[in-house]
Amino acid sequence: HIMSSHSDLWPHIPYWWANKCKAEALIEEFERRKQHDRPGGFFVTGINLTEDLKYICTHPTESLKDLVMSTYPTLLGWVKEQTPGSRVGSLNIIAGDFITESHFAATVVSLNEKLLEGPS
């Protein structure tokens, strides 16, 4: 296996994808996973929403971007409340869609500042 002979390469990093259309449902799923299914090492929490058939049929003129941008206040509010790190209940990598058009980067950087401040 190539990975075992090249210690400078990272192994697979798990990606949490909730497959949810609503921000509240995505947050609920991730809160459950943080307590019960959190991987031991690096993992990505993807705050990516997924349009389902019901949403597409009831919002025929809206795009995925419209959905995401309308929910970013809720999603970023949740991100701001997170604890970064490797402990149970914490997150260490967060990804999202259309991040350049929101306050996503600044919100994630503020989480990194929590790490620099040390334990509370």
Image (cartoon, grey):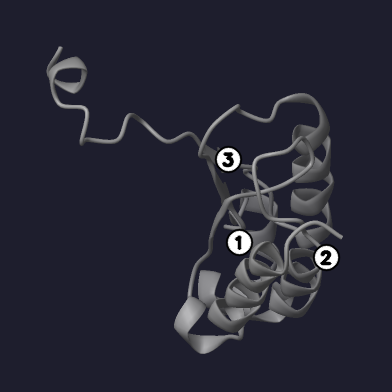
Question: For this rendering, which residue is in front, 114 or 27?
Answer: 114
Q: Which quadrant does the N terminus fall into? A: top left
| Residue positioned 71% across, 68% down in the render | 114
Residue ID for mark 3 = 16
Estimate the x, y position of residue 2 in percent, counting from the top left.
12, 19
* Horizontal side of residue 80 vs 40, given as left or right: right
| Residue positioned 53% across, 69% down in the render | 64
Quadrant location of residue 81? bottom right
Q: Secondary structure at mark 1?
A: helix
Mark 2 belongs to which amino acid? Glu
| Residue positioned 20% across, 16% down in the render | 4
Count neighbours of disc 2 (C-alpha within 10 A) and say few if under 14, some if 14 to 19, many if 20 or more: few
Q: Which circle, 1 or 2, is nearer the viewer?
A: 2
Does the CB distance between marks 1 and 3 fall below 8 Å? no
Residue ID for mark 1 = 56
Instruction: Say whether disc 1 or disc 2 marks the residue closer to the N-terminus.
Output: 1
* Horizontal side of residue 84 vs 13, given as left or right: right
